[in-house]
């Protein structure tokens, strides 16, 4: 059974390449230039529905990338820069409810990150710097009621933190020091 079709030039992959599942259905398609992935690359589920799509430049992911669930609904999208995760990323549950939204810089979380549950309630609102929690932080119950609020400094709780009862009233306040 045919699994790969493409051209070689001076022992390097060149031009369009197509890859197939064992049943013959298309699995992946993309371009090579001088042996490196270049241009648009697309991957499909065995059903033929698109799984992932994005561009390469000189063998590294570049620009907007998207991925989908097996039913064709979008699951994630975000940006790469020279092969590193960089910029805004968003994700959704299969029903289309937003799952997360956050920023990356050089493969590390950087800036604000928000997470929601399938009911659409925010479960976390956090800030990162260089991949570590740094700045305001809030955690919420599955119903969207605050559980804890405070600040992080270089990945560790810092300063005043408030913890809440499951019904939402203030339980206690703690102060973290370096």
Image: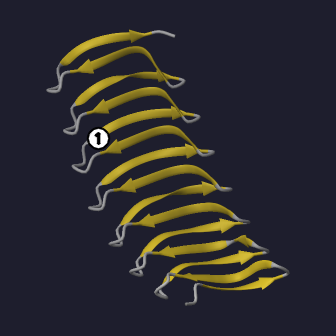
Few, some or many residues within 10 Å of mark 1 (<14, 14–19, 20+)? many
* 76 to the left or right of 85: left
Q: Tell how many labels.
A: 1
Q: Tell me the residue at 51%/74% (across/down).
A: 43
Q: Residue furthest right?
A: 10
- Residue depicted at 71% across the width and 82% down the height: 15
- Say if 111 sits above or below 178 in the image: below
Q: Image point 42% across, 33% down: which residue?
A: 126
| In the image: residue 101, left or right of residue 129 | left
- The residue wearing badge 1 is 122
Residue at disc 1, secondary structure = strand
Residue 74 point in image, percent of width and height: 38, 65
Q: Quadrant of the N terminus?
A: bottom right
Q: Say if 20 sits above or below 72 in the image.
A: below
Q: Quadrant of residue 30?
A: bottom right
Left or right, 70 with reference to 55: left
Q: Nearer the viewer, residue 78 or 60?
A: 60
Residue 68's spot in the image, x, y percent?
A: 41, 67
Q: Position of residue 166 (x, y in %)?
A: 17, 26
156 displayed left or right of 146: right
Q: Position of residue 18 (x, y in %)?
A: 60, 83
Identify the residue shown where x is 43% and y is 22%: 151
């Amino acid at each position: 059974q045919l699994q790969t079709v493409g051209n070689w030039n001076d022992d390097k992959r060149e031009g369009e390449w197509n890859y197939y599942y064992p049943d013959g259905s298309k699995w992946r398609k993309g371009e090579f230039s001088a042996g490196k992935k270049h241009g648009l690359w697309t991957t499909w589920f065995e059903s033929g529905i698109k799984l992932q799509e994005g561009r390469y430049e000189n063998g590294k992911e570049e620009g907007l990338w998207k991925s989908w669930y097996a039913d064709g609904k979008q699951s994630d999208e975000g940006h790469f820069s020279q092969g590193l995760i960089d910029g805004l990323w968003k994700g959704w549950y299969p029903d289309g409810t937003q799952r997360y939204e956050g920023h990356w810089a050089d493969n590390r979380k950087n800036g604000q990150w928000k997470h929601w549950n399938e009911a659409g309630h925010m479960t976390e609102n956090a800030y990162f710097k260089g991949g570590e929690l740094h700045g305001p932080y809030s955690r919420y119950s599955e119903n969207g009621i605050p559980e804890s609020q405070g600040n992080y400094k270089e990945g560790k709780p810092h300063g005043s933190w408030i913890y809440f009862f499951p019904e939402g009233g203030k339980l206690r306040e703690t102060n973290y020091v370096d």
